[in-house]
């Protein structure tokens, strides 16, 4: 069989490290009261709720600002945080998170991320992080798997075709590990040599080889006999002349 084609480097770090998709919670929904007229204890309770939702999804600036309020901020500062500072910090945190998705990303993810960054709104960032990036990444993964299907060996093509018929997780697994396994099978098949068979020249040599000799060469014996006979006849003629 022909040697398996070397696949493109399609094992993506993102594909191999992907876990459960985080949900980027809209902490704005926590502030559902009139902050200016709410009692002090309720204002600080809201700040605590904002803090509780921040670390899990990477709202680092929101977390820092909320901690400062809870560590000794006044009620006026707490109200200002809930009305203004929290929104500013949230927008920056979300923008950072959108930019982080660009690392090792494909064309579709880059385009979707840039569109969200251009909007410069919290709603646009959240829509991309919770939905848009996953839709775009699936398109990028499909393009990579289709590339493997068109350039790989038989096993790679078969595995790629199965992944394209499956789910996002099937695409992810193929890119992370499946193509490597399939390519190894293609290489093993290409390295197997066909069973040995006699070459035409070998067969011809065997068929035309001389049989082993078991006695003197017949032609040589005959020539020697003729020489001896001729010599005897000549000697006999000379002897007869001398007698006469």
Image: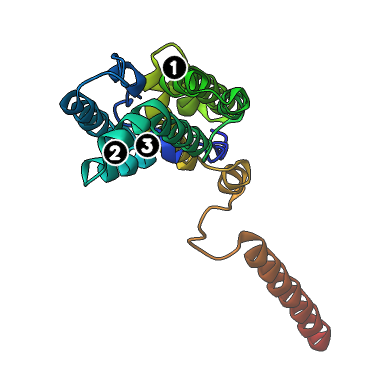
Q: How is the image coloured?
A: rainbow
Marks 3/1: CA–CA distance: 20 Å
Quadrant of residue 120 within the rendered picture: top right
Are discs 3 and 2 less than 8 Å apart at CB? no
Query: Which residue is at a point 55% across and 47% down the rendered structure image?
Result: 206
Marks 3/2: CA–CA distance: 35 Å
Residue 123 drawn at (x, y percent): 48, 18
Marking on residue 131 = 1
Query: Which residue is at a point 44% across and 17% down the rendered structure image?
Result: 131
Query: Which residue is at a point 26% across and 43% down the rendered structure image?
Result: 73
Extreme residue in the left direction: 41
Residue 183 drawn at (x, y percent): 45, 36
Marks 1/2: CA–CA distance: 27 Å
Task: Kindly identify which residue carries mark 3.
Answer: 16
Viewer-proximal residue among 132 and 176: 132
Please identify, in this view, whether the residue under mark 1 or under mark 2 is nearer the observer. 2
Viewer-proximal residue among 1 and 156: 156
Task: Kindly identify which residue carries mark 2.
Answer: 66
Horizontal arrangement in the rendering, residue 183 relative to residue 112 (left or right): left
SS at circle 2: helix
SS at circle 3: helix
How many numbered markers are drawn? 3
Mark positioned earlier in the residue sequence (3 or 2): 3
């Amino acid at each position: 069989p022909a040697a398996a084609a070397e696949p493109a480097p399609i094992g993506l770090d993102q594909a191999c490290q992907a876990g459960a998709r985080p949900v980027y919670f809209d902490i704005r929904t926590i502030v559902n009261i009139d902050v200016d007229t709410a009692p002090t204890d309720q204002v600080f309770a809201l700040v605590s709720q904002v803090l509780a939702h921040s670390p899990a999804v990477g709202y680092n600036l929101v977390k820092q600002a909320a901690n400062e309020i809870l560590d000794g901020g006044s009620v006026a500062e707490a109200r200002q945080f809930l009305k203004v500072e929290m929104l500013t910090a949230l927008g920056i945190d979300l923008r950072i998170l959108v930019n982080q998705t660009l690392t090792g990303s494909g064309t579709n993810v880059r385009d979707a991320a840039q569109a969200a960054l251009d909007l410069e709104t919290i709603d646009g960032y959240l829509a991309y992080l919770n939905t848009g990036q996953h839709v775009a990444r699936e398109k990028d993964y499909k393009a990579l798997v289709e590339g493997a299907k068109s350039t790989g060996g038989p096993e790679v093509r078969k595995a790629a075709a199965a992944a394209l018929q499956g789910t996002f997780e099937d695409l992810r697994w193929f890119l992370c590990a499946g193509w490597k396994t399939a390519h190894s099978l293609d290489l093993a098949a290409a390295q197997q040599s066909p069973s040995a068979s006699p070459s035409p020249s070998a067969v011809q040599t065997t068929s035309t080889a001389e049989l082993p000799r078991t006695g003197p060469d017949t032609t040589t014996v005959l020539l020697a006999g003729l020489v001896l006979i001729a010599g005897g006849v000549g000697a006999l003629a000379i002897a007869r002349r001398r007698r006469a």
